[in-house]
Amino acid sequence: MHHTWLFSVACTAVAVRLLLIPAYRSTDFEVHRNWLAITHSLPISEWYTDATSPWTLDYPPLFAWFEWLLSHAARHVDPNMLVVSNLDYASPGTILFQRLSVIATDVLVLFSAAYALARSASHAKSNVH
């Protein structure tokens, strides 16, 4: 029962986000594009000090490594999004990559949480009997 409800919510959320792919872009779009570029193109020692863009990397290291991981997929979509000096770069491939990577990350987090919740409930149920 709970799994059906969760799956329906997840599918609805993904559908809405897919519909919004061509929609507006906020400042966050350039921020994340820049973070992809920084983590992909610069040595680690410069990740937190590069001042090419006003959108410096200012999140904790785990997030920086996540951006670095995403940058390796991004290079196959549009390598120009990974050039630090390409400020305000927004090719169709870049927009699609960023939107789809957010959706994929949300789905991963949602289903990881659902899995953990299901295991926890199963464990609690087995301790009752």
Image (spheres, rainbow, N blue to C red):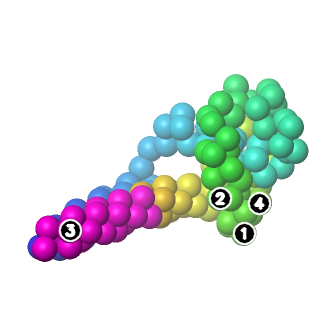
Q: For mark 1, does the 10 Å Cα neighbourhood hold few (<14), some (14 to 19), or many (20 or more) residues? A: few
**Quarter holding the C terminus?**
bottom left
Q: CA distance from mark 1 to mark 3?
A: 48 Å
Viewer-nearest of discs 1 and 2: 2
Q: Which residue is mark 1?
A: 76
* Residue 109 coordinates in the image, percent (x, y): 42, 58
Judged left or right of residue 72, residue 122 is left
Disc 1 secondary structure class? loop
Q: Residue at x 63, y 36 (%)?
A: 60
Q: Using a 10 Å C-alpha cutoff, classify the residue at mark 3 as few (fewer than 14 neighbours), some (14 to 19) or many (20 or more).
A: few
- Mark 1 or mark 3: name the one nearer the start of the chain: 1
Residue at x 63%, y 52% (from the top left corner) = 66
Residue 28 at what x, y percent from top left?
54, 38
Q: Earlier in the sequence, mark 2 or mark 4?
A: 2
Residue at label 3? 127
Disc 2 secondary structure class: helix
Report how far apart the C-alphas of labels 4 and 1 lie in the structure. 7 Å
Label ID, residue 66: none
- The residue to which callout 4 is attached is 79
Write the start and end of the magenta stretch as one range.
Answer: 108-129
Residue under pointer 2: 70
The numbered mark, 2 or 3, whose residue comes first in the sequence reads: 2
Q: Nearer the viewer, mark 3 or mark 4?
A: 3
Q: Which callout, 1 or 2, points at the residue further toward the start of the chain?
A: 2
Q: Determine the CA span between mark 3 and mark 4.
A: 52 Å
* Element type where label 3 sits in the image: helix
Residue found 62% across the figure and 62% down from its top: 93
CB-based contact (under 8 Å), mark 1 and mark 3:
no
Is residue 16 in the magenta section? no
Give, as a three-letter code, the residue at label 3: Asn
